[in-house]
Amino acid sequence: MNHTDKRWMTWGAFFVLFVAALGWMLWPRPELADIESVTRGPLVVTVDEEGETRVRERFVVSAPVLGRLLRIELEPGDPVVAGETLLAVLQPGTAALLDPRSRAAAEEQIRFAESDLERAKHDHTRNRAELEFAKRESDRARRLAGQGYLADDQREAAELGETRAKESFEASEHAVEGATHRLASARARLLDVRNPGRDGDAPISVFAPVDGVVLRRIRESESVVGVGEALVEIGDVNELEIVADYLSSDAVRIQTGARALIERWGGDGTLEGRVRIVEPSGFTKISALGVEEKRVNVVVDLVTPAAERAGLADGFRVETRIVVWEGEGVVQIPTGSLFRRGENWAAFVVEDGRARVRTLEIDARTPKAVAVASGLSEGENVITHPSDAISDGVRVVARESR
């Protein structure tokens, strides 16, 4: 081989290497991507907000008469017993007690209320007997109809009679409750003292109406007070509820009876609660950023026993998480995998080393995970937070493998 041939072979080899290097540089490389597996498991969707505890039933004890209030010795937190613990003592003024005409009218109202209560009790007893009879008749009609001895319309008439008797019985129960409250209200007008035989100048002792603790001492020092002026606030701190104001857009997703999780309350673990009511009227509140927001109060009953939430009392701050959706064995992907494609949701699925767009149907979303109703199966791989360089058909490789 002569020198010229060797030179051409050398230049040819360099040319082949150059073309190979150029091809390698121009050949499209796979895009780096964060890839996660599709999993299956439980998923809970909540709406979260700060809340505040409050005693469910608060009792503000007021002055029954005009007079001079002696110093109240009880302190907030002191226990009280219904009918036994002395809350306050008043020295009535000259115009404190009812005049004879007003007292006679109040006593007459009590007699009317007592008569209404007796009548309501009699109706309740009669309706109970009628309901028991209607139940027996309905059971007998169903049994005979099942044996072919009674027509269907007669059975339906007996069942209708039972339904009407039940409604009348329930109405009579409410009537008894109403009459009881009216009698208590009428008697309250004559709430004079604990000493029926005292004279008009004797001190009036005000006792605790319920068991509980002193929540707030509204009046402390000796002073002159008017009729109905608040003196002491009491309640049972074991009977707590939580009120939290939610954005109206979140409140519409909350259902009565929904499960609530109470966190960051100061103790160990998470407390359980149930939504008792979503108030039907909203209000405007200015956020920390100065934005007007429409808020709705949501009231949650604490389900966790009082022994397991020792120390939690009235007016304490807590974090509430109300469950609006939950499922078991849910197919789910990271929220960062989801993106909009027209009117639908979609994600990039890795198939044979390439990104493929997959249209999805989703059930619910959390800040971290998405419940997929259809479009994906457990064990498939999806791309999280896809970059602009990733499109349908692009080769991809997991970032951690490079």
Image (cartoon, rainbow, N blue to C red):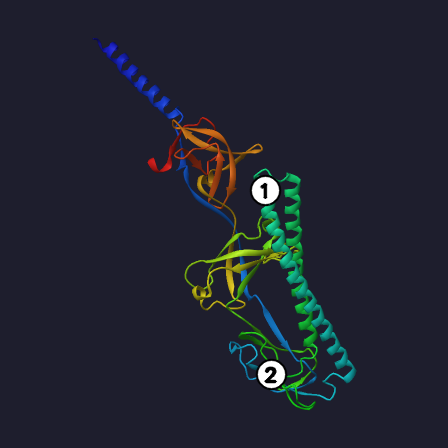
Residue 380 pos. (x, y %):
40, 33
| In-front residue for pair 340/61 | 61
Asked whether the viewer can see residue 283, the reply is: no
Instruction: Please give the name of the residue rendered at 39% of the width and 24% of the height, measured from the top-left corner.
Output: 27
Q: Which residue is mark 2?
A: 88
| In-front residue for pair 142/96 | 142
CA distance separating discs 1 and 2: 67 Å
Instruction: Please give the name of the residue rendered at 70% of the width and 84% of the height, measured from the top-left corner.
Output: 66
Residue 139 pos. (x, y %):
58, 47
For the view shown, which residue lies furthest in the top direction? 1
The relative height of residue 233 versus residue 167 in the rendered view (above or below) is below
Q: Is residue 390 left or right of residue 127?
A: left
Residue 170's disc number: none
Q: Is residue 339 left or right of residue 183?
A: left
Instruction: Please give the name of the residue rendered at 70% of the width and 77% of the height, measured from the top-left corner.
Output: 189
Q: Amino acid at mark 1?
A: Leu
Residue 144's disc number: 1
SS assignment at label 1: helix
Q: Residue 295 falls in which quadrant of the image?
A: bottom right
Q: Residues within 10 Å of mark 2 (few under 14, many from 20)?
A: many
Residue 350 pos. (x, y %):
41, 30
Residue 381 pos. (x, y %):
40, 34
Q: Amino acid at mark 2?
A: Ala
Q: Residues within 10 Å of mark 1 (few under 14, many from 20)?
A: some
The relative height of residue 247 versus residue 215 in the rendered view (above or below) is above
Quarter of the C terminus within the rendering: top left
For the view shown, which residue lies furthest in the front direction? 149
Do callouts 1 and 2 mark residues in contact (Cβ within 8 Å)? no
The relative height of residue 33 versus residue 244 in the rendered view (above or below) is above
Q: Residue 70 falls in which quadrant of the image?
A: bottom right
